Image (tube, rainbow, N blue to C red):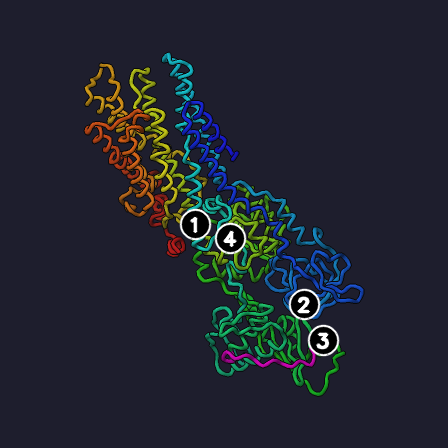
Amino acid sequence: MVHFFALMLWVAGVLAFVAGMPQLGVAIFVVVVINGVFAFVQEERAEKAAERLADLMPVRVTVRREGQVLVIAADEVVVGDLVLLGPGDRVAADLSVLESHDLRLDESMLTGESAPVRADEGARAFAGTFVTTGEGAGAVVATGAHTRLAEIAALTAGVERPPSPLAGELSRVVRVVAAMALGVGLAFFGCALLFDMPARDGFLFAVGVTVALVPEGLLPTVTLSLAMGAQRMAARNALVRHLEAVETLGSTTVVCTDKTGTLTRNEMTAVEVWTPAGSVTLRSEGYGPIARITGDIIAIAQASRAADSAVACVQGRIANDDGTWRPVGDPMEAALDALARRLAGGEARPEVLAAHRYAFDPVRRRSSVLTGDQLFVLGAPDSVVPRCLDAHEADQVVDAMAQRGLRVVAVASRPVTGSVDERRGVDEVEAHLDLLGLIGLHDPPRTGVEHAVAACRASGIRLAMLTGDHPATAAAIAGQVGLALPGSPTLEGDELPEDDEELAALLAHDGVVVARVAPEDKLRIARVLQERGDVVAMTGDGVNDGPALREADIGIAMGRSGTDVAREAADLVLLDDDFATIVAAVGQGRATFSNIRRFLTYHLTDNVAELTPFVVWALSGGRFPLALGVLQILCLDIGTDLLPALALGAEPPTDRALRRPPEGRHLIDATLLRRVFGVVGPAEALLEMTAFVTALVVAGWRPGEDFPTGHALMAASGAAFAAVVFGQMANAFACRSATLPPWRLGWTTNRLLLGAVAVELLALAGFLAVPAVADLLEQAIPPPAALLVALGAAPAVLIADALHKASRARRRDAGPGLATQSASHRAHRRGGVGDPTPAAVPDLIHR
């Protein structure tokens, strides 16, 4: 209600009342209020990230107080309480783990690390995380605002959302339009005084001209364009939470994406098993039961044995819901169970009765299970392989798998004869092993993500990966999807330079990968990129991503896997967690920017025709009559031009939207002004004045004589009015493209515009033929000859526009340095036609 353009409209409405035009004042006020209310409804939900933190906390907690086990409300937990934890429990406060039985926590919301973390005795368990497997107990050391979760929330709340590029451009447009309107109003007030017009009448006349030049349709057109863009993005699984984010995404110069769930499917899958008898490869889709297995019979049998042995050491499993497999527990452990089932033809493997389990230890980096006559061991290759007999070849296999980005685990066993003293040291038990196999697990990239990455680059957007995962895994995935480029650096969060300029130089590389990032790192990266002039889009799904999502020019949260805090802090929510959706949304954002430029071109062309009668009047010293009055101009702005302008704001995106890189473009620039004031505007104004003079001639006026008054002058004014309307009808179609004439686009491809022009034609008939309205506007139906000239404004505008566009194309192709320009560059400069963009780009936009 109080930003600069809204204040300008408030003043214009008040001046309309002062000038004796209350209807106009009311209309302007209604426009401001409607837009203000609409914007408020959209934005009000954006500031609730901190409030939604409560949703991440458990409602009830099990504690032990004074020897008794109690179930209490989460907000009743105090420092010193002993909290009991089991699978699926959400941690209610920061704990110091006192007791751990294979206790593992999902900390991805805080750290970004996709794999569950083992919490042994003495470790910290943070509020908001939850137990994936095992059991344990911990003493409360921090609650409420003192927890790590609350620290991140405070960091999010302390970040102010930066103004969008669109907001800055609209402010610039408003300043230009305001200066132009005030300047013209003051000029005509001076002219009125020079022509001996009473000061009061001159003031009201100047006020009327000033108000007429204010683009009352700008706010509703921008709002509708953004809303249409948001609707189209929603159809592509991108939910817009702030309308201005529609255009901001189109201005993006760098996308900082996470890995798990955005570039990958967030599904651990075993894709390769090496055994001493040979290798086996598997191709499957996620956790589905179907897999294509390659390997000889002996190798497959050995791989099946290795997989069964690995499953015996873990607790995660696959649940079979009527033929649909879903993971339960640790994703890696569930992937091992899926591997065992696939190698066994889809059958569930029998559970191993364990006599004793040696839980996974972060120092040992392995776990084992003792059965009646066998010991099975599972762990990191560098922990298991050295304890095996005759396994030298395995080291080379491990290196080869790691270089392909696979997470490798080793499986071994040994026979057990007689009873085993469970009190013996675990290192002594887990010795003299036989290596059964090496299992390579992979979180596969999403289908089509390579094309999406290529489309981003083709549109001039740099890419960076910021993830909490291991650097080798991050680098491998970045290479597989094409995000990493030759020479692009891979860093860890603790390796980032402290100097912002050095960090900015690193981030200037396209394809940079930063692993093990903390929330503060992502926040700093966003700020450094913005300081170097980038428009930053940041993706994220956890609480740890909240500050960076809010700091970025556009925060993009995951809808499926993301937390409520991330979604509330973001501007855009990907309902399918798919990176390709970002690419489609970028195309829509750029189309929205172009639509606003279309409206401005359309409106400013109308301004040229509206101002021309006043300029002629002023240059003649007041002797040449005004072809249009202030009320007629207001009717043109609101009564006839508004609907076509709104239809232009809903112009759908074209294939070229992603084929041009983002530029430091302005809504109003020299190209637009040349077209408006040098070509289309003068053509429309020339036909307007010609129609006016033709009507006067038909009424008997000859040069040198006094101008007629009464009905003859009203009919001439009606001819000028009709010429502007017909010219604007053609201009609406011409404004659909900055490079192509309307017949190249198709006359019926924007059906909203067809309807708007039809309504505009009916409005013209009403303004001319309804006596009460025509008398109010001081105009009448023009004579046939003048009406014919007015009709000629439509082809005149189309011809002038087509010639201008053709001339621009010839100048570009014949400009300096043509010989050194590549054909692709010339095609790009023509707007993208023929640009060597991957074929996936149009498909991504339309999909």
User: Does residue 412 appear in this view?
Assistant: yes
- Please name the residue shown 66% across and 82% down the image: 371
* Magenta span: 343-356
Quadrant of the rendering where the C terminus is positioned: bottom left
Question: Closer to the observer: label 3 or label 2?
Answer: 2
Characterize the local packing of mark 2: few (<14), some (14-19) or many (20 or more) Cα atoms within 10 angstroms: some
Q: CA distance from mark 3 to mark 2?
A: 28 Å
* Res. 188 mark: none
Above or below 278: residue 736: above
Foreground of the two, 115 or 92:
92
Question: Closer to the observer: label 3 or label 4?
Answer: 4
Residue under numbered circle 2: 86
Horizontal and vertical percent position of residue 435: 61, 78
Residue under numbered circle 4: 573
Q: Earlier in the sequence, mark 3 or mark 1?
A: 1
**Callout 1, which amino acid?**
Gln
Q: CA distance from mark 2 to mark 4?
A: 32 Å
User: Does residue 686 appear in this view?
Assistant: no
Residue under numbered circle 1: 231
Horizontal and vertical percent position of residue 835: 36, 50
Q: CA distance from mark 1 to mark 2?
A: 43 Å
Q: CA distance from mark 3 to mark 1?
A: 61 Å
Above or below 200: residue 151: below
Label 1's element? helix
Foreground of the two, 780 or 524:
780
Question: Closer to the observer: label 4 or label 1?
Answer: 1
Q: Is residue 353 magenta?
A: yes
Above or below 69: residue 422: below
Foreground of the two, 614 or 662:
614
**Prevailing secondary structure of the magenta residues:** loop
Residue under numbered circle 3: 427
Label 4's element? strand
